[in-house]
């Protein structure tokens, strides 16, 4: 739905998932990386 999601869009998508591990910044970083890789793969 969002090929290059913003931090706010990622946070909204994860809003229903509550985790006490504190890895939200790492999850957000992984989502950005995955979006970048998917976009790069689409160009090939």
Image (spheres, grey):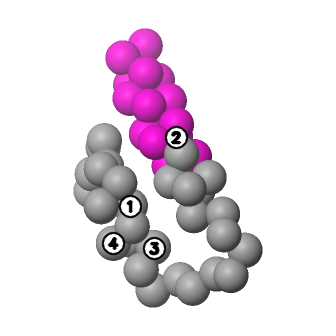
Place of residue 37 in the rendered image (x, y in percent of width and height, measured from the top left): 50, 29
Rendered residue at 31%/49% (across/down)? 5
Residue 26 counted in the magenta span:
no
Question: What's the mark number on residue 12?
Answer: 4
Question: What's the mark number on residue 10?
Answer: 1
Proximity of marks 4 and 3: CB atoms separated by less than 8 Å: yes
Separation of residues labelled 4 and 3 (CA atoms): 5 Å
Q: Quickly name the residue at label 2.
A: 34
Separation of residues labelled 3 and 2 (CA atoms): 16 Å
Question: Is label 2 or label 4 in front?
Answer: 4
Separation of residues labelled 4 and 1 (CA atoms): 5 Å
Proximity of marks 3 and 2: CB atoms separated by less than 8 Å: no
Establish if 37 lies above or below 29: above
Task: Tell me which numbered mark, 2 or 4, is placed earlier along the sequence.
Answer: 4
The secondary structure making up most of the magenta span is helix
- Secondary structure of the residue carrying tag 1 is helix
Question: What's the mark number on residue 14?
Answer: 3
Proximity of marks 4 and 1: CB atoms separated by less than 8 Å: yes
Establish if 13 lies above or below 29: below
Proximity of marks 3 and 1: CB atoms separated by less than 8 Å: yes
Rendered residue at 43%/13% (across/down)? 44
The span shown in magenta is: 30-44
Task: Tell me which numbered mark, 3 or 2, is placed earlier along the sequence.
Answer: 3
Q: Quadrant of residue 15?
A: bottom left
Q: Residues within 10 Å of mark 1 (few under 14, many from 20)?
A: some
- Quadrant where the N terminus lies? bottom left
Question: What's the mark number on residue 22?
Answer: none
């Amino acid at each position: 739905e969002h090929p290059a999601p913003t931090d706010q869009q990622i946070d909204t998508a994860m809003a229903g998932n509550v985790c006490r591990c504190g890895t939200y910044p790492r999850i957000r970083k992984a989502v950005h990386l995955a979006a970048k890789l998917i976009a790069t793969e689409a160009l090939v």
